[in-house]
Image (cartoon, rainbow, N blue to C red):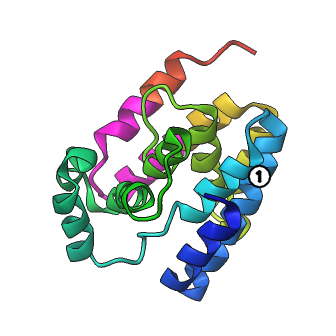
Amino acid sequence: MTCEEAKKIVKPRLSEKRWTHTKNVKKMAVKLAKQWGADPEKAAVAAILHDSAKELPKSELLQIFADNAIIAENAPARPSPVWHGIAAAILAETQWGVTDPEILSAIRCHTTGKLNMTKLDKIIYLADMTSAERDWPGVEDLRKLEMQDLDRALCDALKRSIDFVEEKGGTLDPESVAAYEYAKEHLQEP
C-alpha cells in the first residue's frame, strides 16, 4: 500500500481533528525515519493508518476482534483505550491489503509499545506522542531527545505514558509496562 492509497481509505473515516493529528504524525514519522535510517514511505503509511479505528465505537471494535480472533489475540481483555491500534492493524491486514509485518506491528503497538520494538515501531510510537498539535508539559524536551537518541526518547515516552495513566487512575496495559522495562534494560550508556 502506498501513502496515497492509505490516505484515500483513512481520511473519510476520521473527523477533521483526528485527520489533522494523523497528518501531523505522518510528518513527524517521516522526519524521524529520515533521521534514523528507516524507510520514510513505510513510516508514512503506518502513520496514516495508525488511528484509522480510533473513532469507531467500542461495539464495532469488539466485533472486529470477534471476527478476527486469531489475529486479535487477547485484545478484548486489554484496556479499551489501546483497542484502536490493534483494530487498525487488523483492518489494515484483512480489509485494506497491508501485508508488510513492520507496518502492521507499528500500527498495532503505537499506543502501548511492546517488547523488542523495531525502529519503525519506535518511530510511530514517538511520532504519535510528539506530533505538532501535542502541547503537554515536556513534549518539547521529548521532541529534541527523539532527534538525538531514539532509544532514550522511547524509554522516556513509555515512562511518561505509564505515569499519565497512573495519575488519571486508569488501567495500565501490561504490554506498556513490559515495553518500558525492556527498553530501560536495553539502553546503551551514553
Q: In which quarter of the image is residue 44?
A: bottom right
Q: Say if 18 sits above or below 87 in the image.
A: below
Tell me residue 140's x, y (percent).
Answer: 76, 54
State the predominant SS element of the stretch in magenta. helix
In front: 125, or 87? 87
Horizontal side of 155 relative to 111 (left or right) equals right
Tell me residue 3's x, y (percent).
Answer: 68, 63
Q: Which residue is drawn at 25% across and 65% down?
A: 64
Tell me residue 86's x, y (percent).
Answer: 36, 54
Residue 128 magenta: no
Mark 1 lies on residue: 30
Q: Say if 136 sits above or below 106 in the image.
A: below
Q: Residue at x 48, y 81 (%)?
A: 13
Q: Number of labelled discs? A: 1
Rendered-image quadrant of the C terminus: top right
Horizontal side of 160 relative to 24 (left or right) equals left
Q: Residue at x 76, y 39 (%)?
A: 145
Kindly tell me whether residue 93 is visible in this rendering.
Answer: yes
Which amino acid type corresponds to the residue marked 1 in the rendered image? Answer: Val
Callout 1: few (<14), some (14-19), or many (20+) C-alpha neighbours within 10 Å?
Answer: many
In front: 57, or 160? 57
Rendered-image quadrant of the N terminus: bottom right
Residue 167 magenta: yes
Horizontal side of 48 relative to 133 (left or right) equals left
Q: What element carries label 1?
A: helix
Horizontal side of 113 relative to 67 (left or right) equals right
Q: What stretch is highlighted in magenta?
A: 158-179
Q: Quadrant of residue 88?
A: bottom left
Q: Say if 150 sits above or below 8 in the image.
A: above
Kindly tell me whether residue 140 is visible in this rendering.
Answer: no
